Image (cartoon, rainbow, N blue to C red):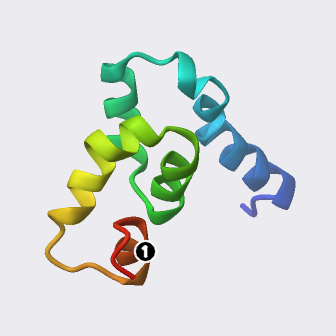
Amino acid sequence: MKTSASSKGKDFADRWEFLKTWSTLSKDEKLLKFNEHTSHEFNFYLYMKDKEFFDNVVKVFIANKLEKDVVDYVLLGLY
């Protein structure tokens, strides 16, 4: 069975729906969402939209990665 483009788009939108209310989530809820959706794109979003969470959680996570790539270095301010 083929999935239509609009169905894939809806699935994508549904998956990231929580971003609309990110600022209202508790720290525990944010940590859970970060754990579920960790990616360069999400890290960049947090860098731009929630600097406190980025500095306290994401930056530490990235800094401790064994294999970093260019996006990681940029977000850490090292490139």
> Image quadrant of residue 17?
top right
x, y (%) of residue 51?
Answer: 46, 42
The answer to which of 9 and 43 lies nearer the viewer is 43
Q: Classify residue 66 as left or right of residue 29.
A: left
x, y (%) of residue 58?
Answer: 32, 50
**Which residue occupies 61% across, 34% down?**
19
**Which residue occupies 62% across, 23% down?**
21
- Disc 1 crowd rating (10 Å Cα; few below 14, some 14-19, many 20+) is few
Image quadrant where one finds the C terminus: bottom left
Q: Is residue 16 above or below residue 71?
A: above
Q: How many marks?
A: 1
Looking at the rendered structure, the secondary structure element under dot 1 is: helix
**Which residue occupies 54% across, 61% down?**
41
x, y (%) of residue 75?
Answer: 41, 66
**What amino acid type is highlighted by mark number 1?**
Val
Q: Which residue is mark 1?
A: 74
**Which residue occupies 67% across, 37% down?**
14
x, y (%) of residue 49?
Answer: 57, 41
Q: Classify residue 20 as left or right of residue 44.
A: right
> Image quadrant of residue 78?
bottom left
Q: Is residue 6 above or below residue 50?
A: below
Image quadrant where one finds the N terminus: bottom right
The answer to which of 54 and 1 lies nearer the viewer is 54
Q: Classify residue 2 as left or right of residue 29.
A: right
> Image quadrant of residue 28?
top left
